Image: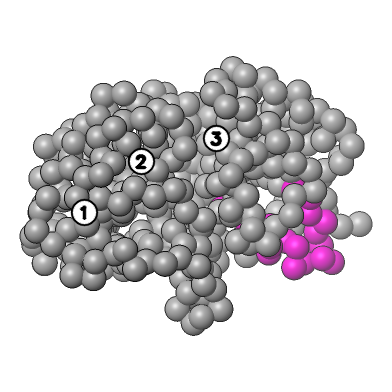
Amino acid sequence: MPIRTLFLFGTRPEAIKLCPVLRRLQAETDVFETKVCVTAQHRQILDQVLQAFQVVPDIDLNLMRPGQTLFQSSSRMIAALEPVFRDLKPDLAIVQGDTTTTLCGALAAFYARVPVGHVEAGLRTWDMAQPFPEEMNRVLTGRIADLHFAATPWAAGNLRREGVPAERVHVTGNSGIDAVLYVRDGLVNGTLASGMDWSFLNPARRLIVVTAHRRESFGPGFERICQALRRLAIRPGVQIVYPVHPNPNVQDPVNRLLAGQPNIHLIAPLDYIPFVDLMRRAYLLITDSGGVQEEGPSLGKPILVLREKTERPEAVEAGTVKLVGTDEDRIVAEAGKILDDEKLYERMGAVHNPYGDGQASARISAAIRSFLTK
């Protein structure tokens, strides 16, 4: 009998990192039967990724509600997942990362006595408030999981130090790199198209691509980020493109402070393929996204991270990423160094990705097969 695996996810980052794994298992029909359940924690931007990878969920819970709180989304997810496990009876549930869907999916599997595989396990800041609530989500998921797929040796070491048996921890690389390399290569060789008209970009100006949406920056943090971007946009030869997250806590300060500013383009959130295309065109990435921290080095882009702490220290140590937090002067100063110093730019932009080689999905598949067929 094939191994029945249930993929549970609900946000764009989860979909980006699980779709390559899903496609790998779907190709091994003699070993795996795959089922997909999405919570739609992020409805629109989730659907964009599903379309890019041609994934059609078996179950779509469609749980997103405007203005939902963590209390509300968590309780709805747990309740909605009970019949999913009862009806499908999977051999393994697979979750990714650190979202509310991740934690609720792992907890529901535990209640159903189904083993859990955790993709991108072992990330830690050791500060439950940064990022919030993601740090707690991944720590708790790590306590529930039976099989841990760590992107790097550092992440695997965190798990072993927490008492996870070494035989349950597998260093696989990050499946998000599988995804970004697949899209990058498709854009280069013409098998994929972004479908975007980039004619609004000025080829004479260096492009800074910005993404920011973290909950811990809501309020004064976003005010400072926006003020820093205003200052950067008036530098000679610079332009900024900011795909703005739909959360009102992001939309309100960004539109109030940046809309209509010269050399700043506020655009709607992009589908995954055009976003990779936009990153390819960038000179510098400024972000609070964990995924962009991982993807940027594969595209040869320096990255400034709008956070005080990161659960991805490997790229900081490699020199391709620098933490700047949400301090206005610090953001402007560090971006200015990269823009003004070609040697620094070349050092930070040298293609070196500590997070993987594009083969994580194959390693995850092999580990699942070994775990469930002993």
Question: How busy is the neighbourhood of tag 3: few (under 14 within 10 Å), some, or many (20 plus)?
Answer: many
Give the label on residue 30, or none. Answer: none
Q: CA distance from mark 3 to mark 2?
A: 16 Å
Q: Is residue 30 magenta?
A: yes
Q: Residue at x 74, y 54 (%)?
A: 56
Earlier in the chain: of badge 3 and badge 1, it is 3
Helix or strand or loop: what does disc 2 sit on? loop
Nearer the camera: disc 1 or disc 2 = 1
Label 3 vs label 2, nearer the camera: 2
Q: Please provide the residue range marked out in magenta.
A: 17-36
Residue where numbered disc 3 is placed: 99
Q: Residues within 10 Å of mark 1 (few under 14, many from 20)?
A: many
Q: Residue furthest front?
A: 260
The picture quadrant where one finds residue 85 is: top right
- Label 1: element kind: loop
Question: Residue at position x 55%, y 46% from top?
Answer: 45
Disc nearer the start of the sequence (3/2): 3
Image: 81 above or below 32 = above
Q: Which mark identifies residue 212?
A: 2
Asked if residue 331 lies in the magenta stretch, the reply is: no
Q: Quadrant of the N terminus?
A: bottom right
Residue 368 visible within the image: yes
Three-letter code for the amino acid on which mark 3 is drawn = Thr
Q: Amino acid at mark 1?
A: Asn
Check contact, mark 1 vs mark 2: CB within 8 A: no
Q: What residue is disc 1 on? A: 263
Name the residue at 48% across, 46% down: 156
Residue at (50% x, 67% y) in the render: 195
Instruction: Give whichever of 238, 27 is nearer the camera.
Output: 238
- N-terminal of the two: label 1 or label 2? 2
Q: Residue 161: horizontal and vertical position, in percent?
A: 46, 36
